[in-house]
């Protein structure tokens, strides 16, 4: 496969001449005028390299570096600098940039750096794949952590569907992580290196919705002075996420059905069909069958989308995961705010598992943000001060055992040794608190049955 390079440069002449030279050197180059455009094309599965000018209006190269490393810290970013910016570029290397090259540069030197970066990226991705094959924690589990059976099943189905190219329907309550699932589905698919375009069907202005999705030709309507790609066409071999699909107007549903069936679109003001190579992922917080019964969603479109379905569970269906998930969200929040990690007391964590979470993971993430910023008192009992002492002690013990099992990767011996109890007592307490024995993945092998 031809090595892929995203070239981010606001100067049109410089962008064009550099791209031509790199294409002659054997690279597949995509030219972009801004960092925002680059972010739309990059995910954790991106297999190429990013070359960016360090000085640009709007999002500069340093900011782009940081944003890309929020997506994946090992994406190789090469910064192009002026002579006066070399100290800044050196600082960027310390911050994770792969390399920098100083203007004016010889294209062959840039090509050599890019080849090294792409070779390194290939090794990183191959190593991740081998770890996943070996059964170790992979990128999907890092994004969707949890040892409850509902999460194990979700990851299994996601990996199975991700390897195919089928359109997918994702259903789950508000804040449960539906877009995280959709993004993971894209990033483990063969389309990972292509755009991921998210469209909120509930937020599109009705007067412009067709133009936004299908694009238009010059003169298609007053104010259409030049041709414009729609979001479907902009996806260019990637994935289109249709969020809040149940809110799409009925008239547009008919046109979407045709797109799904025929994989062509027609821009407004044109009669010429345009082939469309994209994968559609539809997302809904409500059961679409109920919306069909209400007459607000086409039944034929529902069955067209209902080929592969992923159900994202609410936190109430995976309470054992809440302490572990909160600790991960704490680490992410601390890194985001460049603050030291803050320990959460065990009684605080146990209270989280007993609390109702109508906002699901989004609400838990907001709590982690407040906790890291010192806006949440760790001495407070999140489950409520009115709980009986016996209930609070039991919930604390349950949370401690679940956290120990997760911390030791499901291995039995270090769990009961760390807790200072016998193996028999551990089993009895797991049964008492309804902990899933499938969390202990290697117990039989390690302890000889």
Image (tube, rainbow, N blue to C red):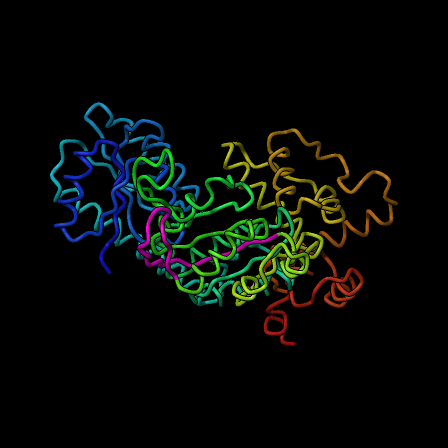
Q: Position of residue 341 (x, y in %)?
A: 56, 37
Name above or below for residue 115 compared with residue 447: above
Q: Quarter of the image containing the C terminus?
A: bottom right
Viewer-closest of 318 and 258: 258
- Give the residue at x 75% y 46%: 355
| Residue 166 higher or lower than 212, as above or below | below
Residue 74 in sight from this viewpoint: no
Q: Which residue is at the front of the view, 205 or 383?
A: 205
- Residue drawn 78% across the image and 51% down it: 395
So how many labels did they put on this image?
Answer: 0
Residue at point 22% right, 57% down? 2
- Does residue 273 show up magenta in the picture? yes
Nearest the eye: 412 or 383:
383
Q: Could you tell whether 84 is left or right of 233 in the image? A: left
x and y percent of residue 97 in the render?
Answer: 32, 39
Location of the N terminus by quadrant is bottom left
As drawn, is 4 to the left or to the right of 302? left
Query: Magenta includes 204?
Result: no
Which residue appears at 33% of the width and 53% of the height?
271
Residue 166 in the image, given as x and y percentages of width and height: 45, 65
The span shown in magenta is: 263-284
Q: Seen in the image, is 85 located left or right of residue 162?
A: left
- Against 266, is 347 above or below? above
Q: Is residue 376 visible?
A: yes
Query: In this image, 423 relative to 131: left or right?
Result: right
Tell which residue pokes out farthest to the top in this image: 84
Front-lying residue, 207 or 319: 207
Expressed as whole percent of the image width and height from the top left, the position of residue 178 reads 56, 52
């Amino acid at each position: 496969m031809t090595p892929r390079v995203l070239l981010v440069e606001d100067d049109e002449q410089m962008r064009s001449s550099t791209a031509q030279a790199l294409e002659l050197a054997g690279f597949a180059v995509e030219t972009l005028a801004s960092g925002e455009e680059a972010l739309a094309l990059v995910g954790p599965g991106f297999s190429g390299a990013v070359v960016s000018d360090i000085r640009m209006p709007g999002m500069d190269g340093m900011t782009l570096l940081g944003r890309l490393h929020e997506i994946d810290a090992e994406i190789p970013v090469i910064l192009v600098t002026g002579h006066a910016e070399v100290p800044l570029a050196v600082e960027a290397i310390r911050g994770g940039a792969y390399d920098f090259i100083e203007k004016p540069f010889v294209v062959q030197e840039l090509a050599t750096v890019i080849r090294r970066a792409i070779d390194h990226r290939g090794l990183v991705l191959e190593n991740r794949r081998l770890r996943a094959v070996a059964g170790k924690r992979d990128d999907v589990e890092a994004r969707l952590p949890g040892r409850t059976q509902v999460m194990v099943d979700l990851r299994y189905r996601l990996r199975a569907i991700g390897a195919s190219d089928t359109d997918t329907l994702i259903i789950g309550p508000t804040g449960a992580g539906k877009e995280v699932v959709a993004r993971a589905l894209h990033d483990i698919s063969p389309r990972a290196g292509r755009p991921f375009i998210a469209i909120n069907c509930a937020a599109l202005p009705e007067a412009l919705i067709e133009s936004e999705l299908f694009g238009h030709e010059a003169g298609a309507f007053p104010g259409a002075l030049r041709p414009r790609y729609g979001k479907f066409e902009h996806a260019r071999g990637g994935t289109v996420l249709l969020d809040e699909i149940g809110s799409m107007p009925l008239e547009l549903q008919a046109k979407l059905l045709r797109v799904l069936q025929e994989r062509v679109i027609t821009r407004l003001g044109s009669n010429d069909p345009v082939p469309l190579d994209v994968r559609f992922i539809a997302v809904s917080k409500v059961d679409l069958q109920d919306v069909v019964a209400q007459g607000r969603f086409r039944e034929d479109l529902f069955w067209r989308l209902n080929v592969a379905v992923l159900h994202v569970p609410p936190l109430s269906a995976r309470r054992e995961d809440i302490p572990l998930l909160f600790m991960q969200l704490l680490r992410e929040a601390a890194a985001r705010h460049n603050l030291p990690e803050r320990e959460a007391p065990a009684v605080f964590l146990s209270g989280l598992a007993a609390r109702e979470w109508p906002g699901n993971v989004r609400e838990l993430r907001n709590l982690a943000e407040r906790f890291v910023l010192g806006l949440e008192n760790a001495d407070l009992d999140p489950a409520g001060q009115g709980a009986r002492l016996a209930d609070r002690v039991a919930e604390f013990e349950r949370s401690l055992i679940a956290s120990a099992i997760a911390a030791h990767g499901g291995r039995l011996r270090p769990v009961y040794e760390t807790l200072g109890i016998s193996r028999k007592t551990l089993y009895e307490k797991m049964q008492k608190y309804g902990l899933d024995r499938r969390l202990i993945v290697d117990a039989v092998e390690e302890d000889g049955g």
